[in-house]
Image (tube, rainbow, N blue to C red):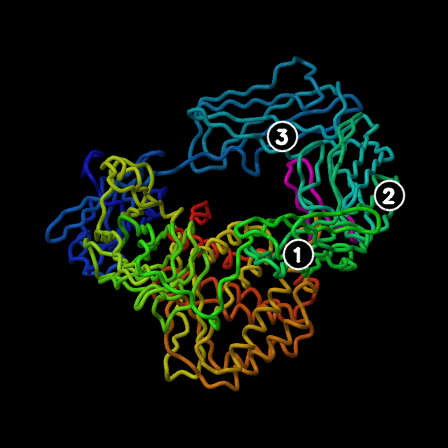
Amino acid sequence: MTSVHEPVLHALSVEPRAARPGETVCVTFRTRNLGTSASPPGTVAFLLGDGFAALDETQVAVGSVAPGDDVVAVVRARIAAPLDDGTELEVQAVLRVPDAVLGTNVCAVRVRSRPVLDGPASGTFVEPVDTDRVRVRAVVTNEGDGAARDVRVDVPAPAGCVREDGEEPAVLAFERLEAGASVATAFEARIVEPVAVLQADDGEVRFGDGQRCALPVREVVVMEPVIAAPCVAVRPSRRSVDVAVDVRNDGWVDARDVRVRIALPAPVRVVDGSMFVDGVPVAARGGRRGCGDAAFARVERSGGAHVVVVPVAARSTVRIAFAAGFPGGCVGGTVVVGAGAHEVAVPFAPELVRDVRMRLIEAPRVVAPDDDVRVLAEVVNAGDLAEELFFCMTGAGIVVAPEAVARAVAPGSVAVIELAVRAHDSLSDDGALDVSVVVCDAECERARAEFAVVVRRRIASSEDEPPAFDAERSPATVHAALHGPDDVASGAPFAIRVDLDVEDAVEMLAVRVCEVAGARYVPGSTSLDGRFLLDRVGVSPLMGDGLSLRGIPGGMRVTAACTLLADSAVCDEALIVEAVLDVDGEQRPCQPVAVHVRGRDAFAAQPAGLTYHVDACVIESSPPPSGAAPAERAAAVVVETPQALVVPEVVEPLRVDAADDAFTFWLRLDDERLDEVARLLHGATGRGLVPHVLALRVFFPDGEASGDPGVAPSLDGVRCALRDVFDRLFVTLRIPGFDVASDDLDDVALRRAMRDFFERLLDAPAAGGRCDGATVGITRERARELLAGFADAAYGAPAVLRALAALLPTRCESEPLLGAALARYARALDDVLARYEGAPLELFDDALARASDRGLDDARTALMVALRSRTAFAELPC
């Protein structure tokens, strides 16, 4: 045995943790090889405490396991002799390897035996004697497997009643109540206050060392309430109506379940989460069974109406308040509320609002004198009425403002307007041209957007005579800084960034990042000022001959970045990253950056004395700062319990090689995209299938490897159609009270684009091979099956979504853990969508808004865990 001050291997567990004499328990030793090489063979010795009888050999030999695999040893034991309740039997194990002996944590099995004093044979009984009195009886029977000591039975009078022979509760006391024995007490009580149900629900039994249990209620006396006509108040607004219903009980007894039926007009829907009963929120969801968040109320759906079931105390009022939303164009209706034998109808009419908003999509930053200034503006009619709008541009430096552009915008729709004006030829160089985009109707201005354009003379084109180069001018001042992380884990990616501050104008500036020994480039990760660049046959534009920039004005800041992947075989070495600038033909090296590659240990011991079971592993939540003290580096290491650490299940992806009749699609998993994925999946729980459907757009492939000239354009056509569908979907989600339906996803243009894409895919030559980054492979047979599924479907939403889910990435060569999580998520989403193919339309509509699938939720959690090392947003709890 080890003391609590020695480091131990938290690898031991026992099941069950509580057992009875004669039962068998299973003691399991399990720990993971967290190193980068195979673990040495050894022996696991199980140390069983007194009270255990081993059923297997306690010395178990374990062999060598590969990195990432588990070392497992199991032994069974029986609790050999009867023991007292609460006795704890301890067990420990020792792992012996050639160069170390590691003790494990101590596990305990608690022996259980108890009496049962609140079983079916025990309880309280209330029986009517006359109109003013009731008789209360209490029976206590020990139905357990052990005797109860120091038994005390307290039975007070029911609520609203007092004992006729005293105000204190009836009490029975016994030193010991054997198993099977029974005791009883009875008294008469007088009713002094009206209540809905007369029941002795406060009776309890105390025994042992502070143990207690409530006596079940077996017989009650039920009284009747009187429900008055409800009072309904309706307050409409633009897109919603607030409804308050007061339900009063004029009787002298409480009403436990008063059904209040609330019927709304057809276009009006209750906003989820807005239902309150006396200030307590109650969920209002559709379904066959009622669902309530409050312990005293629940909401059901019946015949298209909401039925709120609430208790109403005697001579009191309960208020039901909620908000309901409706789309634009709704003319109002009547709210009908029924309670008891009464029904009240209250009409309402919505308020009409005019709201026009505008934002600039594209606007030039630089314009030459006597040149056109063209802008793209997005106008949203967020009001309730159709708008006849006029668009124009104004500014002091505009030659002649053209005629206003007229456009009719329907309620709830978006319009994109292109406008152009000409800058005056007398504008000074490096000046500013202030331009305003104005939206007006026939009466007044509705919206305005302003921006400034820098006026700069146009640079001579390549057809003109090139400007003479002044060889005697002083060298341009360019400051360069190369940035990279201090250290990185073996096999993990890391970002390299080059910041260029150009003080003087430069005709030609080239930046080149040298090849790094021990690391390789992540394809598609090169960016310039936040915009990603195309690779040169798998090589970064920053490498090789470098990236050339021409005609850079002074005062500019240029940032180039790319991502490298540390070789998994490199351990405890420094990777030297170097960059070279070429400023107008002058070579200038940058200060190199050293990135230390750290490895991992095979077994990591943790401090003993913990009260819970954890695996023997450490996970570094974030890299410690450079030069940090040992205490600061230790603070950056956290221990994950098995309940919090969810390891994605390994799913074998489709293997694509040159011999397969298959096609390969690739996806660039940059940090910005993975952050968007994490934001979508983080809020997916409890919101139906809509968040998972939104993820299809983010995971849509960036390209394909067939090389056929007809496949790439058809893939772009699917991408454009998918973008249009999801743009409309986002508008629908912004309207309060509206859920996404299958009609929002079953788009004719999207289905046509998908059909054209899969038909071209079947006619194209097979293209296997491997691509860097995340990839997915689809066989020709699978493509033919998906095409037949959505081409002939009665309504195409599930089938088309399933075809899109087939394009989700299932393999990531550089990050196997992320690839396994992506493959698991793709399989789970395909399984859920397959269940709704051919199902009634109403079931799929309900699934989009409210469905929940355990397998899909587990796959989402596994993917969130795999994203923790790539995006800060994924650090939130899963």
The residue sitting at the top extreme is 166
Query: On the image, numbered disc 3 is attached to which residue?
Result: 124
Q: Nearer the viewer, residue 233 or 330?
A: 330
Query: Tag 3: Cα neighbours inside 10 Å, few (<14), some, or many (≥20)?
Result: many
Query: On the image, numbered disc 1 is attached to which residue?
Result: 377
- Ranked by sequence position, the earlier of labels 1 and 2 is 2
Figure check: 157 above or below 712? above
Report whether 329 appears left or right of 39: right
Q: Nearer the viewer, residue 587 or 460?
A: 460
User: Label 2's element?
Assistant: strand
Residue 545 pos. (x, y %): 31, 68
User: Label 3's element?
Assistant: strand
Q: Is residue 16 magenta?
A: no
Q: Nearer the viewer, mark 3 or mark 1?
A: 1
Q: Is residue 595 visible?
A: no
Residue stretch rendered in magenta on the structure: 285-305
* Quarter where residue 750 is shown: bottom right
Say which amino acid is labelled 1: Ala
Residue 845 pos. (x, y %): 67, 61
Look at 79% across and 39% down and name the residue there: 243
- Ranked by sequence position, the earlier of labels 3 and 2 is 3
Q: Nearer the viewer, mark 3 or mark 2?
A: 2
Query: On the image, numbered disc 2 is attached to which residue?
Result: 348
Look at 71% across and 21% down and name the residue there: 160
What secondary structure is the magenta-colored segment mainly? loop
- Ranked by sequence position, the earlier of labels 3 and 1 is 3
